[in-house]
Image: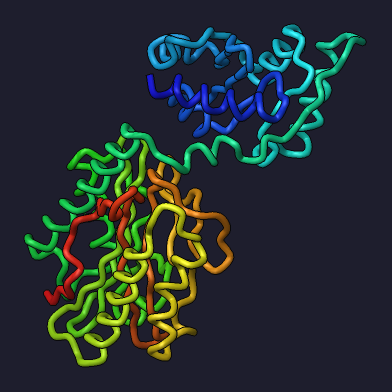
């Protein structure tokens, strides 16, 4: 199973850091490592290989099906029970997800460990600093397949709406957004990847505008930023089109963003610094005099979360690796007039990046 391979990768990380065990409590990380999709689950991963998966009685049957290869511990106080088991097994150093544990949660965990030790040696708690998220940044074949299917659902949903004339003047942003969501669900998505963005006219100059009752009108930009979730994996795509007739300034802005987006895609390569990738795209926009109109990072990783590592932007850190799934989404936003964003989801490979969102990026005038 892929999940077993992922646990071995985390086990190697734990051993390198001198940990005896790792307590994984983030539900998405638990899913990544075990396949479990319920609302209460945690994993005690031990460097000796004797792992424990914990949940409560509601999920006994589900856990047996989804996590058949890890010993099951059923206890409503799941995390506390796993922590106690770590003590009983003699763990000296216990890793935990400090970015997930609250101050009160940490205090409770320390009390549980002390009580379980009963005056003996209490394990030393050590943060693993998003170690699982670092593993998740590089997708395996199963994950890339899920991403392909999620992107295909989004592509088809938009194609069907455009072909049926659903993107037309007189409708509201809310109506278009709800229909796009419904179409993705009908095509097999579990859910939209995030709150679908439909922004027309001046609203298209707002990067993350929330759809409202603004009516689509001829001559306006229409920006659609949306995605589908399939098998827990998210797609992300933005396309900007024009209703009716495109003015010269709209053609110019669109062409500029398309050029910047192509530069960003071309910069995706194994070993490329994420800041350099952002710069490759951002410089195109800056050279045209619109630096102040590109107000966000170039992209981000996608997977079990819509935004995950790596971040591609001026404040990013690190370099790209084969198997990373990322977005490239430059934009130019002219307040009061309109804006353009063009976004794709791609997978970094040893050769050219694999494009997963296949909807045309030619300026569509409906």
Q: Quadrant of residue 239?
A: bottom left
Q: Which of the 4 quarters of the picture holds residue 332? A: bottom left
The coloring applied to the image is rainbow
User: In terms of depth relative to the viewer, which is nearer, 54 or 146?
Assistant: 146
Asked if 118 appears above or below 123 in the picture, the reply is: above
Can you give x and y, in whole percent of width and height, for residue 129 in the image?
Answer: 66, 40
Q: Is residue 284 above or below residue 329?
A: below
For the C terminus, which image quadrant?
Answer: bottom left
Residue displayed at 23% across by 41% down: 149
Q: How many discs mark residues in the rendered view?
A: 0
Residue located 45% across and 59% down the image: 272
Comparing 15 with 33, the one in front is: 15
- Is residue 12 shown left or right of residue 3? right
Is 255 drawn above or below residue 154 in the view shown?
Answer: below
Q: In the figure, residue 41 lies in which quadrant?
A: top right
Q: Residue at x 30, y 42 (%)?
A: 147
Q: Is residue 93 left or right of residue 323?
A: right
Measured from the top left, where is residue 54 in percent x and y? 57, 15
Q: Is residue 145 above or below residue 270?
A: above
């Amino acid at each position: 199973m892929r999940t077993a391979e992922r646990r071995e990768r985390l086990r190697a990380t734990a051993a390198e850091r001198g940990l005896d065990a790792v307590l994984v409590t983030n539900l998405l990380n638990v899913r990544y490592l075990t396949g479990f999709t319920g609302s209460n689950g945690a994993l005690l991963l031990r460097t000796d290989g004797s792992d424990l998966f914990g949940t409560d009685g509601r999920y006994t049957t589900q856990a047996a099906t989804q996590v058949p290869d890890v010993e099951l511990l059923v206890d409503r106080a799941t995390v506390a029970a796993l922590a106690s088991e770590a003590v009983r097994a003699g763990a000296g150093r216990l890793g935990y997800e400090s970015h997930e544990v609250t101050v009160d949660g940490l205090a409770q965990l320390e009390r549980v460990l002390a009580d379980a030790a009963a005056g003996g040696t209490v394990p030393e708690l050590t943060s693993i600093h998003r170690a699982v998220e670092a593993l998740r940044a590089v997708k395996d074949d199963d994950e890339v397949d899920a991403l392909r299917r999620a992107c295909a659902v989004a592509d088809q949903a938009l194609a069907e709406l455009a072909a049926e004339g659903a993107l037309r003047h007189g409708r509201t942003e809310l109506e278009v957004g709800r229909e796009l969501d419904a179409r993705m669900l009908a095509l097999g998505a579990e859910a939209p990847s995030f709150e679908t963005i439909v922004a027309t006219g001046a609203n298209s100059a707002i990067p993350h505008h929330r759809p409202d009752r603004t009516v689509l009108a001829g001559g306006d930009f229409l920006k659609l930023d949306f995605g589908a979730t399939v098998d827990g994996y998210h797609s992300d795509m933005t396309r900007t089109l024009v209703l009716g007739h495109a003015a010269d300034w709209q053609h110019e802005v669109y062409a500029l963003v398309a050029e910047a987006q192509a530069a960003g895609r071309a910069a995706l390569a194994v070993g490329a610094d994420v800041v350099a990738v952002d710069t490759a795209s951002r410089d195109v926009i800056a050279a045209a005099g619109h630096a102040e109109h590109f107000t966000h990072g170039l992209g981000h990783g996608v997977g079990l979360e819509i935004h995950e590592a790596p971040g591609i932007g001026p404040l990013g850190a690190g370099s790209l690796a084969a198997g990373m799934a990322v977005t490239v989404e430059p934009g130019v936003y002219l307040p009061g007039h309109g804006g353009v964003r063009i976004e794709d989801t791609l997978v970094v490979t040893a050769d050219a990046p694999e494009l997963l969102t296949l909807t045309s990026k030619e300026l569509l005038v409906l």
